[in-house]
Image (cartoon, coloured by chain):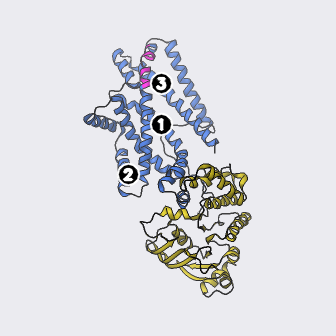
Chain colours: A yellow, B blue
Amino acid sequence: MQENSRLMIEAREVSKFYGAFQALKNVSFSVRDGEKVVIIGPSGSGKSTILRSINRLETIDRGTIIVDGMDVSDPKVDICKVREEIGMVFQSFNLFPHKTVLENLTLAQTVVRKRNRREAEQIALELLKKVGIAEKAAAYPAKLSGGQQQRVAIARSLAMNPKAILFDEPTSALDPEMIGEVLDVMKNLAQEGMTMVVVTHEMGFAREVADRVIFMDHGQIVEEGTPEHFFTSPDHERAKLFLSQIL
Amino acid sequence: MSKNPTSHTPIDVGDGAAIPNKNDAGLFTAWRIAFFGAIFVSLYLAFGKSDPYYEIFKFVPDGILVTFKVTFGAILLATCIGLITGLGRISDNRFINGAASLYVEVIRGIPLLVQIFYIYYALGRFVKIPDMLSAIIAMAVCYGAYMGEVFRAGIQSIPKGQMEAALSLGMSRGQAMRQVILPQAFKVVLPPIGNEFIALLKDSSLVSILAVSDLLRRGREYASETFSYFETYTVIALIYLVMTLFFSKLIGIMEERLNAGK
């Protein structure tokens, strides 16, 4: 799709070990500006680990990861600068329970982006409206349903004006009836051109939204391609087996 | 991965001080009987039996004030020491972590009475500070170690995802700690700190062996002059009991308020 746009994320020969266990084996991939990449694979395949390596929530043992021109794998690089630009949405939402929905959205804006409170609140309210939850601005996260919490978490991430957002199984902790509302928000984001890397088990979402699907197994990228190709005629046996198990 | 990431695991650090709980009817009535009983007995002794109780009740209150000063001073200082120790115990920095752990291990391995003697005389050897301040420092150093464990447990009871979420928004570790982790941890550690406060109130009687005229020491002073040992220590025990029960109740109420606010 965006063949000529610049590279937003580039991972080269990334390896990671937990003791003797190798969680990532020479993983290389790249994400261009505006691209939507979905990473799928069985649990324990390393898909969350590679995603979390992008903003250094996990450190890697070998290889390099370049994000927006900054070398994440270089310990001397100020990782906060990278994280300011790359949002993240977690499986378990991780909203701050001691702060209201609005404060969840304004905290990093004021502390990290140094915006004044009025400006931050204005941005926050607009984003809450966008994810369809403006009326809950004054509520505490505990009063919200899982779907609502995850939408707030997405809005919190957007409040930092990120250049890309990483989604780590954003719907896996949700009750089935709430998955749709979160996926809708994500689809809207995709349409607006947000660069997204999504680890998910939602194959419908992958098929509809992804520019590219990466299939991982045992810490390796087994197959990478367009969703049409991957879902209809995958090249590798392991991918075929995986698809036959989940579809 | 849990479905309810915001719920904290309750931590249980504390000793003997029974904080009354509305749901626990037996304890609640026991508290009433003990508290109002102690007040009634005190009033009866002071005004009904007057001699020598009235004199004792007139003589010892100076000590109550000192006991309060030592207790409040020590709990404040111990909380500060505890926070720093707790942060040190979870630090990735090996030196800081080692120092904090060493402090906790050393303090926990020495009887409180021995520590109070030691710190008091060690301080006295190098610096000239008032006796009361030395006593407060001695108590705070001891309790700081226990408090450090309370804070460590409190901070660690906050789900890992909270730190990750804060970091992934671009906050530094310090910012994340101040803005996200500690405000949540304080709520968790408040009940155990209440327990430590009660324990400290009682243990503050140990400073009577130093040149600090707390409640117990005032009692000893009176008793050694008049030889009314039994009467004096009856009064001392009653006053400690009323104070301890009063603060237990107060902390219990505060805790209830805190839970209601959730």
Q: CA distance from mark 2 to mark 3?
A: 37 Å
Q: Is there any visible trace of residue A98 in the rendered image?
A: no
Sequence-earlier tag: 1 or 2: 2
**Disc 2 target residue:** B101
Please give left or right for residue A137 compared with residue B36 in the image. right
Q: Please state the horizontal and vertical placement of residue A93, each as a whole percent of the image.
A: 62, 60
Which numbered disc, 1 or 3, marks the residue closer to the eye?
1
**Disc 3 target residue:** B239
Marks 1 and 2 belong to one chain: yes
- Inspect the magenta stretch and tell me whether residue B64 lies in it: yes
User: Type of residue at label 2?
Assistant: Ser
Marks 1 and 3 belong to one chain: yes
Q: Chain of mark 1?
A: B
**Disc 1 target residue:** B197
- Span of residues in magenta: B55-65
Q: Residue at x 55, y 37 (%)?
A: B19
Q: Chain of mark 3?
A: B
- Within 10 angstroms of label 2, few (less than 14), some, or many (20 or more) residues? many
Is B155 located above or below residue A4 in the figure?
above
The answer to whether mark 1 and mark 2 are in CB contact below 8 A is no
Q: Residue at x 48, y 56 (%)?
A: B173
Q: Main secondary structure of the magenta part?
A: helix
Q: Please state the horizontal and vertical placement of residue B11, each as a whole percent of the image.
A: 52, 48
Q: Please state the horizontal and vertical placement of residue A138, each as a whole percent of the image.
A: 68, 48
Q: Is there any visible trace of residue B218 in the rendered image?
A: yes
- Inspect the magenta stretch and tell me whether residue B102 lies in it: no
Sequence-earlier tag: 2 or 3: 2
